[in-house]
Every structure is written in C-alpha cells, then in structure tokens.
C-alpha cells in the first residue's frame, strides 16, 4: 500500500513572518494528519523553517534547483547547496518553470540527475496544456516528458522520485481535473513506468495530483486508486485549507 504525500508549493508568496506563522500552524496539527506532508517555501526561508519543523514529521522541499552543481551562475541555487542545509525534497519541472523560464526536457533531466546525485528526492512535475488536452494528445505528451527527463534513470533512482501530474490548465485556474481524468492519467503514467521498469517498481512510485486541489475536491481526488497525494499551490497558503486536505481520506 503506497502512502499518500501532500506537498504545499508556496511559490513566490508570503513574507518571512507570514511563512513562519504558517509553518508553525501546519506543524501544530500533525498528530491528526493521515498523510505525509512537505512544505516548499521560498529558498530564503528554508533554514528558518527547518528550525520550526525540527522534531515534527513535516518535511521541507525547495521549489527548484539549478541544472549545474556550482560555479558562475548568478542568482541560481544548486542541489548541493540544498543538500548542505538538509533539505530532502526539491520540485523539478513545475509548469511555471517550463513556461516562464523556458526549462527544456533536457535541462530538467540534468536537474533530476544532479538532485539525485546529492541525495535529494525530486518531485518531478508533468502535465499537458489545455490545447494538448483538447487535441486528445495528453498521454503522448506526458509520456514524452517522462521519457525525456526521467526514464534514463536506474531502477534504484527512479524509486527516489515522486511524480506530480499537474495538468497546466488546472493550475491556479480553479479548474480541476475530474477524479476520473486524474485517475486515467495516473494509471497511464503507472503503466508507462511498468513498461520501462516493471510492475513492482511502478506500484511503489508515488504519483501526486496537482491543479486546484481544495478541501472540497480533495477527498474525491485522493480516493482514486492511483492518486497518491497532492501538490497544492493556492490552498497550501491557508492553514485551515491545507490541513483539511491533509486530513482528507
Ligand atoms: C501548483 O502550482 O503546483 C498547483 C497545483 O497550484 P494550484 O493548487 O494553485 O492549482
């Protein structure tokens, strides 16, 4: 039985004090949580939040990392830097990075490799745009994302990756994939992993859903057999909403 993992992607939101208050509020409820929890704040707040989360089961993740290990790359933050402050998870390939910062499949492959080489666990995002779905090409598109950035990994390494299926048309739009649409794509992703790595490994990989998950739709999405948690944007910024999602199902 796979465990479910709920991750909050705070994106470029919250001032320092607000972030600390929110992290403390999330920690407070942890005794009642049914799922594992990861918070992904701004890089700037990672060390302060690590202090707040110390001793709790809530883990930290970064929202991105560089596609190089070190050097003259002004403004970048590398996987070894994140590892050196004890951050266990890193989101890689969020659609906002792909769209606004032109991150290619090849670049994301490099990020995945560097993150894994430094002991981080990537949360790899994939998902189609509205146009691709209207064209009914979503499976081909997601398969290519997996093949180009993930399926070069060894059997050991692929099991350290969490996959987040995030249809771009559902991110921050209020539109959510129906539970059946989410289940269909999660099942498809698992069949592709099985074809490449075998059924046992495919059954162990966590596949989160992301895209306007909220307290009122979380239970139905999370009860789909292949939906192993959520990557939550907007609703992770409100303690009560995020806790309701963690408590769902
Ligand atoms: C996200 O950015 O990963 C996300 C799923 O955002 P939202 O929940 O706001 O749609």
Image (spheres, grey):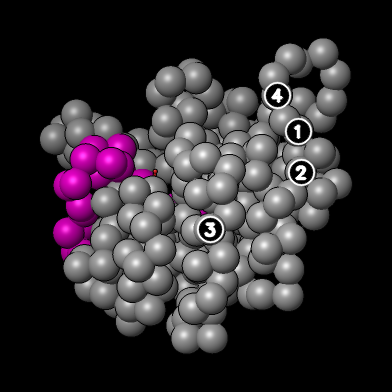
Asked which secondary structure carries label 4, the reply is loop
Q: Which residue is at a point 58% across and 54% down the rendered structure image?
A: 20
Label 3 or label 2, whichever comes before in sequence order: 3
In the image, residue 191 sits, relative to residue 234, either above or below, namely below
Taking the view exactly as shown, the residue that stands out farthest to the left is: 134
Residue contact between numbered discs 1 and 4, judged by CB atoms under 8 Å: yes
Q: CA distance from mark 3 to mark 1?
A: 27 Å
Query: For the residue carrying disc 3, how many other residues have a C-alpha within 10 Å: few (<14), some (14-19), or many (20+)?
Result: some
Is residue 60 in view from this perspective? yes
Q: CA distance from mark 1 to mark 4?
A: 6 Å
Asked which secondary structure carries label 2, the reply is helix
In the image, residue 102 sits, relative to residue 10, either above or below, namely above
Q: Residue 248: x, y in percent?
A: 33, 78
Asked which secondary structure carries label 1, the reply is loop
| Quadrant of the rendered image containing residue 58 | bottom right
Q: Residue 66: x, y in percent?
A: 69, 29
Q: Which residue is mark 3?
A: 21
- In this view, the residue in front, 12 or 149, is 12
Foreground tag (3 vs 1):
3
Q: CA distance from mark 3 to mark 4?
A: 27 Å
Q: Which residue is mark 4?
A: 76
Q: Which residue is mark 1?
A: 78
Residue contact between numbered discs 2 and 1, judged by CB atoms under 8 Å: yes
Q: CA distance from mark 2 to mark 1?
A: 6 Å
Q: Which residue is at a point 81% across and 39% down the rendered structure image?
A: 81
Taking the view exactly as shown, the residue that stands out farthest to the front is: 17
Label 3 or label 1, whichever comes before in sequence order: 3
Q: Which residues are magenta?
A: 163-181
Whether the magenta-drawn stretch holds residue 245 is answered as: no
Q: Which residue is mark 2?
A: 82
């Amino acid at each position: 039985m796979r465990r479910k993992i709920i991750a909050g992607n705070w994106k470029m939101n919250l001032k320092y004090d607000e972030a600390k208050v929110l992290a403390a509020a999330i920690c407070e409820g942890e005794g009642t949580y049914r799922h594992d929890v990861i918070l992904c704040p701004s890089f700037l707040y990672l060390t302060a939040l690590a202090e707040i989360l110390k001793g709790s089961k809530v883990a930290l993740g970064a929202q991105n990392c560089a596609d190089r290990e070190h050097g003259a790359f002004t403004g970048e933050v590398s996987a070894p830097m994140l590892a050196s402050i004890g951050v266990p998870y890193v989101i890689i390939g969020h659609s906002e990075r792909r769209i606004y910062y032109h991150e290619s499949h090849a670049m994301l492959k490099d990020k995945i490799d560097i993150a894994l080489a430094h002991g981080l666990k990537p949360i790899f995002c994939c998902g189609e745009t509205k146009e691709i779905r209207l064209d009914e090409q979503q499976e081909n598109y997601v398969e290519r994302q997996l093949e180009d950035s993930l399926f070069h990994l060894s059997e050991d390494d692929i099991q350290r990756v969490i996959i987040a299926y995030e249809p771009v048309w559902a991110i921050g739009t209020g539109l959510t994939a129906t539970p059946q649409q989410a289940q269909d794509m999660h099942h498809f992703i698992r069949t592709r992993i099985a074809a490449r790595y075998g059924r046992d490994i495919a059954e162990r990989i966590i596949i989160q859903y992301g895209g306007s998950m909220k307290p009122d739709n979380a239970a139905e999405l999370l009860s789909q057999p292949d939906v192993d948690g959520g990557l939550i944007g907007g609703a992770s910024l409100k303690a009560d909403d995020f806790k309701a999602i963690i408590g769902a199902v």
